[in-house]
Amino acid sequence: MAKASHTFSSSHGPPTFLCFILLSLVRLSGAAYSIISDCDETFNYWEALHLVLYGNGLETWEYSPPFAIRSWAYILLHGFVAGPLKWAGVSKLGIFYAVRYSLALLSAALEARLISSVSRNISSRCSWLLLAILSTSAGLWSASVAFLPSTFTLYTTTYALASLLNPRPRRETILVTTASFALGALLGWPFSLLLSLPWVIERVLLSRHFLAFLRSVLLSALIAVPIFIIDSYLYGRPVLVPLNIVAYNVLSGAGPELYGVEPWWFYLANLGLNAGPVVLALSLTAAPAVLVAPSKRQGKTAQPQQQTRLSLLIRTAPLYLWLGLLSTQPHKEERFMFPAYTCLALNAAVSLDSILTLAASPPRILPQAARNLMARLAPLMATALLAGSALFGLLRGAALVENYTAPISILPHAKLDALPALSTAPLTVCYGKEWYRFPTSFFIPSDSEHVKWGDVRWVKSEFDGMLPEPYVPAFSKGGVSLSRLASSTRAIQGGFNDLNQEDPTAYVDADKGCDFLVDSDGGAGQAERRYVLEEENWERVACLPMLDAAASREAKGGAATTIARTLWMPRAVRNVVGAELVYRDFCVLRNRQREGGAMKL
């Protein structure tokens, strides 16, 4: 029985360097192949970075000085990677992926550090379980490389989580943990402070570290100083962005509900896809599992620094708080859960570790035969659960890439920079009903000696909300200077509001104002033209298939089609089970009536 109880454990946790290498491979693949799933990432962050580097891009109302709910300090942080590459002559697309790769490596390093901390402070077996969960999560595969404050907060939370696992922290550890939470709240998302609440209660009420914690809070507050200086300079007025974010979301009469509301169970369904149903179920049962499992690890898995049952419960609490708070909010988005992704993975690992511990020492009220059976079967069942979860994550990630990679792939596929130049007038790329799939200006070719490119423009569709508009240009012959950048970021443009009200001046006429148009041949509303079918006016430069989710939901096949939309399924298997997926052409079209920005005569 003893041998069986340790089938899924080891006396040593995984080496940190091995964890880093494995997670780096996984995260780098995410950087290379994952899609941009949220247009907020494009318009609020990639476009702002494009302005900093190249002096142009698309501005959202959040960056307008009267509102100022996005931090330029956060954008400039990524300039440490992007800036030198730009001056070294790396292409815009190369810089896009270089930033992603740097985020991937940072995430891998932080996750490896967390696994090492779990090995020291909980159990070696738990650290192996955590490695398996982190490396096979479809949600983390894409979230870890997103250019979003919620992803930045994921990093700071992961760092803090690794530090606070120590049940007997030194003063330096308390300072580092506090500063990490503070950095995530000030430079990322202020609401992420909720994730620190259980640890704060433990430090203040359940330990003797109150003064050390108070000093750490005061020192961490200094992080706000450079952020305040940078944002105030670029907005042209005193601005503390975290306060503006809180005021807009909590005190504003409008608030984020303008952008849609979802039912209370939205995050449970979303996490079921991104983390997998097995990992989600384990993460939610972490607290009960800790309560019923023996309080001390036995045999070779015992650790010198044992977590008490109470301390382990405190460290599983952040997920429950975060999920509970967000589920009560009407407006819900997938990215809002990003800060707690590693908390979820840790909870799942702790839960499974506790279940295995209980199975190795089952209650004595059970017959001996049942106890022996539990000890033998539990490790095998745990292995099967993790293998199934890993397969789920792989198939989920593959489905997203196959079904929705067209928007991020179509512009490089079209090779616009290789098309013959017909004029020196700036060329314009337009988007209509697919505006929210624009992958960022980093995918628009750079100006060359023969071809110039203007800002991306919008063609009217059935969408009647507010769209981003071009920044006031910040470039000059010598490049983008700090003063020119500030003149652009301080400019107040008409049309921006916090009520999601449409600005009619944001549109151009497709026939007269667009040299290229990105459109799909599906999902057009009654008032929308199907440009892909107007072959006499619009030439197909390049097309890629993209899943039409709405049409697929209405297609035949029932449950088989639903599974095929959710998880990757080979075409041969889809034919056998009767799953029907509907794909549309996602195309770059060339205006036959224009030549390099000039109308044909």
Image (spheres, rainbow, N blue to C red):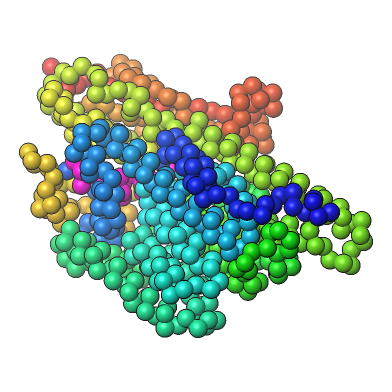
> What is the span of residues highlighted in magenta in the rendered image?
37-54
> Is residue 53 found inside the magenta-colored segment of the image?
yes
The residue lying toward the viewer, choosing from 20 and 289, is: 20
Please name the residue shown 66% across and 25% down the image.
573
Whole-percent x, y for residue 331 in the image: 46, 58
Q: Where 244 falls versus 544 (above or below)?
A: below
Left/right of residue 62 with respect to residue 149 in the rendered view: left
> Is residue 255 found inside the magenta-colored segment of the image?
no
Q: Which of the 4 image quadrants contains residue 182?
A: bottom left
Whole-percent x, y for residue 218 in the image: 33, 77
Whole-percent x, y for residue 535 in the image: 33, 17
The quarter of the image holding the C terminus is top left
**What type of secondary structure mainly makes up the magenta span?**
helix
Q: Where 428 falls versus 240 (above or below)?
A: above
Please name the residue shown 23% across and 26% down the image.
515
Q: Which of the 4 image quadrants contains residue 51?
A: top left
